[in-house]
Amino acid sequence: MRPAKWMSAVCLSTLLLTTALSGCGNDEESGTEKTEIVLSGWGGNPVEKKLLNEVLADFEKEHPNIDVKLNTINDQYMDVLKTRLIGGTAADVFYLDAFEAPALIETGAIEPLNKYVTEDFDIDDFEKPMIDAFRSKGELYGLPKDYSTLALFYNKKMFKEHGISGPPKTWEELERIAKKVTDEEKQVYGLGVMPQIERLYYLAESQGGEVITDGRASFADDKVVKAIQPIVDMHLKDKSAATPSEVGAGQSAGEMFGRRKAAMVVEGNWNIPYMEDTFPDIDYGTAELPTVNGKKGTMSFTVGYAMNSESEHKKESWELIEYLTGKEGMKKWTSKGLALPTRKSVAAELGFDQDELRRPLVKGASYATVWQDGPSLPIVMNNFNNQFLSAYLGDRTLKEALKDAEEQANREIKVTE
């Protein structure tokens, strides 16, 4: 793909408020000049919003020459961001999901950051999979602000009732436990499953196959089929796994788990505050995901801060990114445990690496597969998920479903080139 030619950026505040212009403004009382930069991101829960505003206020105190204007995009974030980048009205700094990073990097819309990073910034402090998610051809295009891996959530009471001493260490052990605790008559299953490639990616590649090869979908490969066939078999043959919708829990594995319809689910850090708020009486634990073929694996979902390559205030934009992803800013942002810090030192300082529930999630960070695999991944995801469900429900074989999905994905990928 050839890089898009982006128009020169203008300050987003002009577009939204029509009362201020991008750039420097005069502080009439102090006589000093301030530079306004715009930060775009999506909305979060009230606690996250409060934390971010506090971190930005701390930054402005330490950088009195910079004002940060927070612009929240609540719906269709990437569509809005891309439109603004093309139109020259995008923010100076913006959230960038690792999932979307490869395609956006190709356009030339993101400023390379290598030249800004100093030794004191301590790049090596970041969890490697998360920082590498924003690299391309040796250049750094973003800095990860937080992440979550996946871990196994298990109901301690249900385990105890069935004489199970602890969480499974291997996938084979998970299958045995799932069968043991399942009670179809009561619609209680051993494993709650989210039938999505974003949850199964690490498992799909555990037998040596690849979901994407050279930008093309390749998930109909026999090695991939073999790797995820056990998920289908648990549902159709063992009857020990089910999706949330099959037990009236909507689309949430967390709700399925909280309502005691599943003894085990594979979920991320976000499930911990959800359980605290919604199902506080459930006695549960977390563990690293069971090994497959003797190897550890999990998924990681991470978001970074990126700089608009057409920003007129790159120096100030870097100062903001540096602060937000530095040790002080990251510590405050992740202090409530709603997201995990991508800096190892911050995780240790906050005690997340020793926390009973979050420790398995933190341990998984070093070996996680980041939810990212080139510009074609969004197309691959949509086609895989659409067809995989039909195999999971038993409408056709897994091989047939994935073959059709792969062919359709590659037709769509070809059109975009």
Image: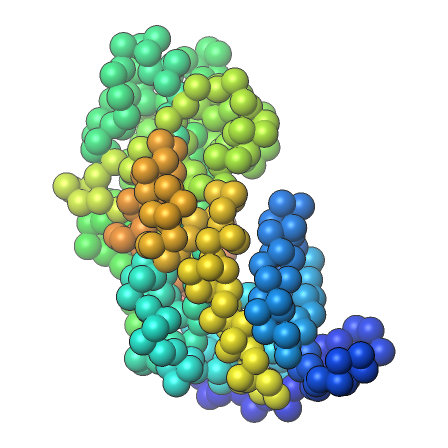
| Residue 354: % across, % down | 32, 38
Q: Is residue 34 left or right of residue 374?
A: right
Residue 257 in sight from this viewpoint? yes
In the rendered picture of this protein, how many numbered marks are placed on residues? 0
State the residue at coordinates (53%, 35%).
Answer: 273
Quadrant in the picture for residue 118: bottom left
State the residue at coordinates (68%, 66%).
Answer: 70
Quarter of the image containing the N terminus?
bottom left
Q: Is residue 230 left or right of residue 251?
A: left
Quadrant in the picture for residue 184: top left
Query: For the view shown, which residue lies furthest in the left direction?
Result: 294
State the residue at coordinates (67%, 82%).
Answer: 35
Which is more toward the observer, 5 or 346? 346
Q: Is residue 148 above or below residue 252?
A: below
State the residue at coordinates (64%, 62%).
Answer: 57
Query: For the view shown, which residue lies furthest in the front direction?
Result: 30
Q: Is residue 34 above or below residue 49?
A: below
Q: Is residue 413 left or right of residue 93?
A: left
User: Coloring scheme of the render?
Assistant: rainbow
Query: For the view shown, which residue lies furthest in the right direction?
Result: 19
| Residue 115: % across, % down | 39, 85
Residue 381 in sight from this viewpoint? no
